Amino acid sequence: MTSKNRRIFSLVLIAAAIGAVALPAQSQTKEVVIGYQDMVLPWRYAQETQAVEKATGYKVSYRKLGSGAEVTRALASGAIQIGEAGSSPFAAALSQGVPIQIFWVADNIHNAEALVARNGGNESSIKTLTDLKGKKIGIPYVSTSHFHALVALQAAGINSKDVKILNLRPPEILAAWERGDIDAAFVWDPVLAKIKQGGHVLTTSGQIAAQTGKATFDALAVRTDFAKSHDEFLGKFVQVLAEADKRYIANPSAWTADSAEVKAVSKWSGAEAASVPDSLKLYAFISPAEQASTQWLGGGKTSVVAQSLEATAQFLQAQGSVQQVLPDYAVGVNDRWVRRAAQQ
C-alpha cells in the first residue's frame, strides 16, 4: 500500500469511527419540535412556564398549526416530532401509513365542538339539521368536527351532498362568518365562542356521541422513530401534561380571566381570556390512571381509542376521505407513558 493510499485509508477509518460515535449521539439530541393548535387546554400554562423544558432538559420549539390535517402532514414529513390533533385526523393519518403513536388523550371533546347556525335574515329558518339542506357550512376537513358533522347529517337522514361543506380552517371560518359567506359552522373554541354570539347551537359533539355512540377526542401523537430513542423524555412530558390537567381539575374556579393560568391559555390559543373559563368547562380531562385503562389507551385492540380510530376510519373511507382501513389501530396507540405516570 502506498503512502498516499495509507493516508486515505486512515482518513476513511477515522471518518467511520467518528460516524459510529456521532450517529447514536445525534439520535439522542435533546431537541424536540411540538406542533399544537388553537385548542383551549390546561397544558397551555405548561407551555408558558416552560415546564417541559425544566422537567426534561430539552430544547422545545412550539409550532402553531392551523388544523389537524396540517399537524399530521408535519408529523409525516418529520417537520415536527410530536403533534396535537383530533381523533379524526389521527385516524386518517394512520390509515395513510404515517408512523405515529397516540400517547396522551388531551381531552374528551364532549360539548367543546358544536354546529352553530347563523341568526337573522333568511338563515333564521335554520332550526334543525334538516334545514341545512342547500346551506353553506364551514368545517375544517378531516377534523373531529368534520367527522361529527357527517355523522350528524347521516343520523338525521341528510345526504352530505345536499349541503355545501366548505373546507375552512378555524380562523377562515371566523372570517367567512363575519363576511356572511357561510350559513353555519362546526368548530371549536376560540372561534366557537365568537360565532355563538351571532348564532345558535344546533347540536354538539357530546350530543352526537350520546345519540350515535361515536365519540371524539383530542390527543397527542409522537413519531415512532422519535419515541424509540426518547423514552425518558416522553415519560417526563406526560407527567407535565398530567400535572397541568390536575392543576385545573383540583381548582377550576381559580382559573379566572385575570389568572396567570388563563392568561397563558389565552396567549397560546388566541382565545379571549374572558371566554377561556367557560370553554374549559366544555371538555373532560382524563387522569393517567383512566388513560391507562381499556376505556382509553390501554388494552391494545380492545382499547376505546383504537376502536374509535377504526370506527372513524371506516366512516372516512365511506365518505372517500381515506382509501383503506387498517385491520388493527392499536399499532398507533401507546399506553407506555401513561401507565408510568399513573404509578407516580
Image: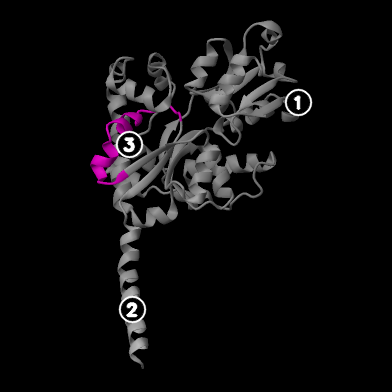
Q: Quadrant of the N terminus?
A: bottom left
Q: Quadrant of residue 259?
A: top left
- Number of numbered discs: 3
Q: Which mark is residue 162?
A: 1
Residue 173 appears in the rendering: yes
**Type of amino acid under label 2:** Leu
Q: What residue does disc 3 label? A: 241
Residue 344 appears in the rendering: no
Residue 144 position in % (x across, y down): 55, 33
Residue 245 higher or lower than 98, as above or below: above
In the picture, measured across the screen, residue 106 lies left or right of residue 67, that is left
Q: Which mark is residue 115?
A: none
Question: Which region shows up in magenta?
Answer: 38-59
Residue at image location 35% in from the left, 87% down from the top? 4
Residue 332 higher or lower than 61, as above or below: below
Can residue 316 be found in the magenta stretch? no
Residue at image location 49% in from the left, 16% down from the top? 193
Residue 152 position in % (x across, y down): 63, 26
Residue 265 position in % (x across, y down): 36, 25
Residue 5 higher or lower than 42, as above or below: below
- Choose the circle earlier in sequence order: 1 or 3: 1
Q: Alpha-carbon distance for marks 2 and 1?
A: 69 Å
